Amino acid sequence: MKQGNIIGKRIRLVRELRRFTQQQFARKLRDAGHDVSRDIVARWELCETPVTDTRMLGIATVLRVSVLDLFPPRGRGRPRIF
């Protein structure tokens, strides 16, 4: 299985912490100028579809985290968003 991105699981984690549904999250991204549907969000979260750098920045902005927070943590340290 070819992995489309490495941040999908973190997108889902932070989205759920922010209590956004996939539809609400997609709407917030559209409001921020990104052409995103709920289906695209679902494919990101399943790591099936790559995330462009501009969308990654939009995702981080909407979720109120840094871009680095979207990447899996290295080692055993807890991510800063918790």
Image (cartoon, helix red, strand yellow):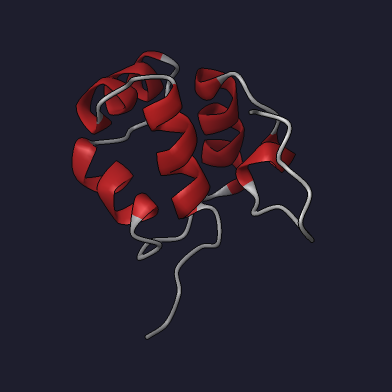
The image quarter in which residue 34 lies: top left
Position above or below: 48 against 14: below
Instruction: Write the residue at 26% across / 20% down.
Output: 24
The answer to whether residue 4 is left or right of residue 57 is: left
Question: Which quadrant is home to the C terminus?
Answer: top right
The image quarter in which residue 19 lies: top left
Out of 82 and 39, give the one closest to the viewer.
Answer: 82
Instruction: Write the residue at 57% across / 40% down.
Output: 56
Q: Residue furthest bottom?
A: 1
Residue 16 x/y as whole percent? 37, 30
Instruction: Write the residue at 46% across / 60% down.
Output: 50
The image quarter in which residue 26 lies: top left
The answer to whether residue 45 is left or right of residue 57 is: left
Question: Which quadrant is home to the N terminus?
Answer: bottom left
Position above or below: 43 against 60: below
Instruction: Write the residue at 36% across / 17% down.
Output: 28
Position above or below: 80 against 48: above
Out of 19 and 43, give the one closest to the viewer.
Answer: 19
Residue 14 x/y as whole percent? 49, 32
Out of 53 and 63, give the one closest to the viewer.
Answer: 63
The answer to whether residue 22 is left or right of residue 66 is: left
The answer to whether residue 10 is left or right of residue 16 is: right
Position above or below: 47 against 32: below
Residue 51 x/y as whole percent? 49, 52
Out of 58 and 82, give the one closest to the viewer.
Answer: 82
Q: How many numbered dots are placed on residues in this image?
A: 0
Residue 11 x/y as whole percent? 47, 41
